[in-house]
Image (spheres, grey):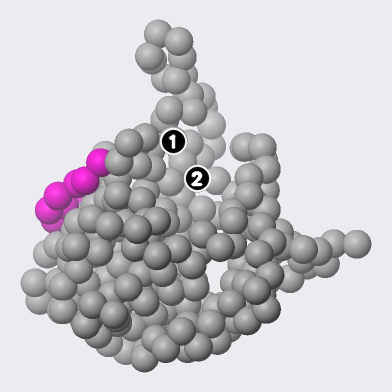
Amino acid sequence: MTLLFDDPFGRAVYDFHFNSINQPIIVHSDDFEDDTIDTEYLFRNYKKMPALEKKAMSLCKGTVLDVGACAGVHSVYLQEKGFEVTALETSALCCEVLKDRNIENVIQQDIFKFNDQKFDTILLLMNGTGIAGTLAGLDVLLHHLKSLLNPEGQILIDSSDLIYLFEQEDGSALIDISADKYYGELMFQTEYKNWTSQPFPWLYVDQNNLENSIEKNQLKLNKVFRGEHFDYLAQITY
């Protein structure tokens, strides 16, 4: 029997770190076939980071807020480099792992409810726009992140344009314009062992829609770094 458990990710991270259990996390979506995430990958070192993550690491400055820190891949690296890092994570189990990995500042809280500090760099990686859930939610997310920035601060956030999923043989894209939602708004469930999460929305956003949201919030898209397959890292400033 599969049990509902709100934190399959946290349980997998906890099991790997404290019990050396490396069992994959299964990702379910109505839009795709099931996918798997190797839990060990959530503990990767700098050498195993994708190029865009390495670029984000090189762009960090000052005090850093790592949003959705998970097992601490980026927090651990940055703290070792001498940065003052705050790891923000909703999962209590992930927070236990972060503390055991000696991250000095660990806060268990939802980013939308966090407003106690300001930072020079706010980091949202591994499709950081996903937290927004929807295009409308992206406006809300950026508005809130702006309130957490110090003067001269920056937001480093990555995403992917899923337009490639709709490409035809001639290179054009066939999208149902009558659909009631944006093609990058997806619903997922995660599963680990016999625990399955509640469904949750996750946003992949193309660069044009990201730029629109940035402009609405009177922010500036400073630079975009492109990956190998429709993925990109955006550096956003005042």
The picture places residue 203, in percent across and down from the top left corner, at 46, 50
Mark carried by residue 162: 1
Q: Which residues are magenta?
A: 215-226
| Residue assigned mark 2 | 185
Q: Is residue 204 visible?
A: yes
Q: Going by the image, does 4 lie left or right of 148?
A: right
How far from the left and from the top, in percent, is residue 191?
71, 59
Q: Quadrant of residue 35?
A: top right
Residue type, mark 1 in image: Leu
**Label 2 amino acid?**
Glu
Q: Residue at x 32, y 36 (%)?
A: 228
Query: Residue drawn 32% across and 73% down?
Result: 77
| In the image, residue 222 lies in the stretch drawn in magenta | yes
Circles 1 and 2: CB atoms closer than 8 Å: no
The one nearer the camera, 46 or 191, is: 46
SS state under label 2: strand
Position of the N terminus, as image quadrant, is: bottom right
Q: In this rendering, does residue 147 appear at all?
A: no
Q: Residues within 10 Å of mark 1 (few under 14, many from 20)?
A: some
Q: Quadrant of residue 205?
A: top left
Q: Nearer the viewer, mark 1 or mark 2?
A: 1
In percent of width and height, residue 74 lies at: 36, 69
